[in-house]
Image (spheres, rainbow, N blue to C red):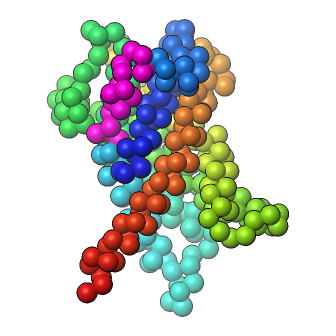
């Protein structure tokens, strides 16, 4: 949650980029930088932090569940002699934890997508949620409780892709850097491996991410949803906006991933130290 406070503006830009040019309309933003400057100009500094409450709730639900399940399964599957699980089992634990966390975090994700997308609409079409709890209550009341889990399948699929790609590419990158002879196993090596891993993860997960964003933000048109399913989103994006539009918002997505990971671990280390000092020292 601490890391999200710093990277929320990048998340907002990424979501706006993914919705830009939807339905064969002309693209609102040419580049991510153009999106950021346009949002600042039209909505001010407060505008780039729209949806922060939803971003924080998403971390509190999704990340807490994911890390909790990963740790529990990891400990359960560690051998009696302390041998950690093998790579494939580790990847499977990561995917299971990611998918479960994504299911729990979907309502906050739906609120986040809608809140960050609101500012691009004309005033009369805006949903105007005050905060994440107001959004969740209104979605449940106006569209039914199942709408809170709309886009649940692509959200879980994205979590599986992210966890698999991250685990595999991080260990491979780290090994490659160590084998090059230019790096030793220290913080610089971990940081560079994280950034390479982030690049691979971003490229692999963006098409699933755009499906998730479009489905969670869609409205009913004449009583029918804009998209039938995830495959329909992919086909429409490719047909009307071009194949490479599946990677719209690549820059803010990648720029968010690196700092978010690094900041998360910095906060985690500090909190662990404080916990040991305050509760375990006695």
Instruction: Identify the main secondary structure in magenta.
Output: helix
**Residue 198 visible in the shown view:** yes
Asked if 34 appears above or below 146 in the picture, the reply is above
In the image, is residue 67 above or below residue 3?
Answer: below
Magenta-span inclusion, residue 48: yes
Residue 281 position, x and y percent, is 30, 84
Q: Nearer the viewer, residue 59 or 148?
A: 59
* The residue positioned farthest toward the bottom in the image shown: 81
Judge whether residue 270 is colored magenta: no
Is 250 located above or below residue 84 in the figure?
Answer: above
Residue 184: horizontal and vertical position, in percent? 73, 70
Quadrant for residue 97, please give it.
bottom left
Which residue occupies the foreground of this view, 235 or 61?
A: 61
Q: Quadrant of the C terminus?
A: bottom left
Q: As drawn, is 54 to the left or to the right of 188?
A: left
Measuring from the top left, give residue 61's x and y in whole percent. Answer: 32, 52
Residue at image location 35% in from the left, 41% down from the top: 55
- x, y (%) of residue 10? 48, 35
Please report the residue visible at 61 percent of the width from the left and 48 percent of the height from the top: 198
Count of numbered circles on the image = 0
Q: Residue at x 67, y 23 (%)?
A: 243
The span shown in magenta is: 39-55
Tell me the quarter of the picture where residue 234 sits: top right
């Amino acid at each position: 949650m601490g890391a999200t406070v710093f990277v929320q503006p990048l998340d907002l830009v990424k979501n706006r980029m993914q919705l830009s040019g939807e339905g064969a309309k002309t693209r609102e933003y040419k580049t991510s930088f153009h999106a950021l400057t346009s949002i600042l100009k039209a909505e001010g500094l407060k505008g780039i932090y729209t949806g922060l409450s939803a971003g924080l709730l998403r971390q509190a639900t999704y990340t807490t569940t994911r890390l909790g399940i990963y740790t529990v399964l990891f400990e359960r599957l560690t051998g009696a002699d302390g041998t950690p699980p093998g790579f494939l089992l580790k990847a499977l634990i990561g995917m299971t934890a990611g998918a479960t966390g994504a299911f729990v975090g979907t309502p906050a994700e739906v609120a986040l997508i809608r809140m960050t997308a609101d500012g691009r609409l004309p005033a009369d079409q805006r949903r105007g949620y005050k905060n994440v709890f107001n959004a969740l209550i209104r979605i449940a009341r106006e569209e039914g409780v199942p709408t809170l889990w709309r886009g649940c399948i692509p959200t879980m699929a994205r979590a599986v892709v992210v966890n698999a790609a991250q685990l595999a590419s991080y260990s491979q990158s780290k090994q490659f850097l160590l084998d090059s002879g230019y790096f030793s196993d220290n913080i610089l090596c971990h940081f560079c491996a994280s950034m390479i891993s982030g690049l691979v993860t971003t490229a692999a997960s963006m098409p699933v991410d755009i499906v998730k964003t479009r489905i969670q933000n869609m409205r009913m048109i004449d009583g029918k949803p804009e998209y039938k399913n995830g495959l329909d989103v992919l086909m429409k994006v490719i047909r009307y906006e071009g194949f490479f539009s599946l990677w719209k918002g690549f820059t803010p997505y990648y720029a968010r991933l690196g700092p978010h990971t690094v900041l998360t671990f910095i906060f985690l280390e500090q909190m662990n130290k404080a916990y040991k000092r305050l509760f375990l020292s006695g």
